[in-house]
Image (cartoon, rainbow, N blue to C red):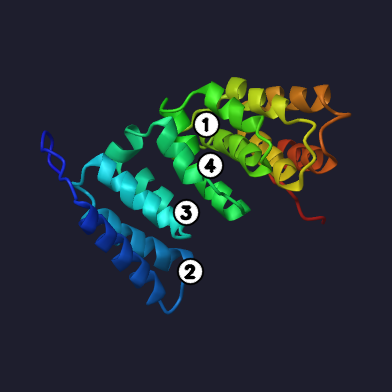
């Protein structure tokens, strides 16, 4: 879409057709690996290039609810207008019903973390997720911090917000939360190693052993699990 051009509206039937054709293209793949799936996503993104952000979000949400949350989130992530128009209700609609680490991580990295980085959702929103009775939402809160510290995704290091979420979940021993805690702290480590070291020392008797071990390895060697020599 050229600068100043009016975004194209897609009627409901047109959106449904795009979703159906995209799912059909996936079903027809001989090999469903990441490069092949991303090829399908790129084809859909090309068709949605000039579309109105609301229609892009609608297509993405329909794909997510069809069981392709990664694809739905990436379609939105790769459309600047859609990503920059996200509201909390949009983000939480994509995350509603998450029930696996693959779904949560796709949501956290491609949608909620990106929305947080761009100021489309607030610190309070993510903190509310961290207090959820649903451990998948608690994991999502931690995974969202990874984007704040992901150089390739525009993050520049954010110890304040990252450690605020980690502090809330430091004594949460649900396995999926512990693994996300490790990921969040390891993502911050290259930017703020002393802040991460201080967090480990402060919570040494509370933080899960796995998270302590993996984060200390990252600080010492740059790797989560360095191979023994």
Label whose residue precedes the other's in the sequence (4 or 3): 3
Q: Nearer the viewer, mark 4 or mark 3?
A: 3
Label whose residue precedes the other's in the sequence (4 or 2): 2
Q: What is the CA distance from the residue labelled 4 to the residue labelled 2?
A: 21 Å
State the residue in front, 96 or 101: 96
Question: Would you say residue 78 is visible in this rendering?
Answer: no
| Image mark for residue 69 | 3
Name the quadrant containing residue 212: top right
Q: Which residue is denoted by mark 4 in the rendering? A: 108
Q: What is the CA distance from the residue labelled 2 to the residue labelled 1?
A: 27 Å
Q: What is the CA distance from the residue labelled 1 to the residue labelled 3?
A: 21 Å
Q: What is the CA distance from the residue labelled 3 to the residue labelled 2?
A: 15 Å
Q: What is the CA distance from the residue labelled 4 to the residue labelled 3?
A: 11 Å
Tell me: 205 left or right of 45. right
- Badge 4: how crowded within 10 Å, few (<14), some, or many (20+)? many
Determine the residue positioned at 85% across, 40% down: 209
Mark 4 residue element: helix
Determine the residue positioned at 29% across, 47% down: 56
| Image mark for residue 206 | none
Q: Nearer the viewer, mark 3 or mark 2?
A: 3
- Badge 2: how crowded within 10 Å, few (<14), some, or many (20+)? few
Q: Which residue is denoted by mark 1 in the rendering? A: 148
Residue 10 percent location from the top left of the image:
19, 50
- Badge 1: how crowded within 10 Å, few (<14), some, or many (20+)? many
| Image mark for residue 33 | 2
Label whose residue precedes the other's in the sequence (2 or 1): 2
Instruction: Spot the residue most to the right.
Output: 205
């Amino acid at each position: 879409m050229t600068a100043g051009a009016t975004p194209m509206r897609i009627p409901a039937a047109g959106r449904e057709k795009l979703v159906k054709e995209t799912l059909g293209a996936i079903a027809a793949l001989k090999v469903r690996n990441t490069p092949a799936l991303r090829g399908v996503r790129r084809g859909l993104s090309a068709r949605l290039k000039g579309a109105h952000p609301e229609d892009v979000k609608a297509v993405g949400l329909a794909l997510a609810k069809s069981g392709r949350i990664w694809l739905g989130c990436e379609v939105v992530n790769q459309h600047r207008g859609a990503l920059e128009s996200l509201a909390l209700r949009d983000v939480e609609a994509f995350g509603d019903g998450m029930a696996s680490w693959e779904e949560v991580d796709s949501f956290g990295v491609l949608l909620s973390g990106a929305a947080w980085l761009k100021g489309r959702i607030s610190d309070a929103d993510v903190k509310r997720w961290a207090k959820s009775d649903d451990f998948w939402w608690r994991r999502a809160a931690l995974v969202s911090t990874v984007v704040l510290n992901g150089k390739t995704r525009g993050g520049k290091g954010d110890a304040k917000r990252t450690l605020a979420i980690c502090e809330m979940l430091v004594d949460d021993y649900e396995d999926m939360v512990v693994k996300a805690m490790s990921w969040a702290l390891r993502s911050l480590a290259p930017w703020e190693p002393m802040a991460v070291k201080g967090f480990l020392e402060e919570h040494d008797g509370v933080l899960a052993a796995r998270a302590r071990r993996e984060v200390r390895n990252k600080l010492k060697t740059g790797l989560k699990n360095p191979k023994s020599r």
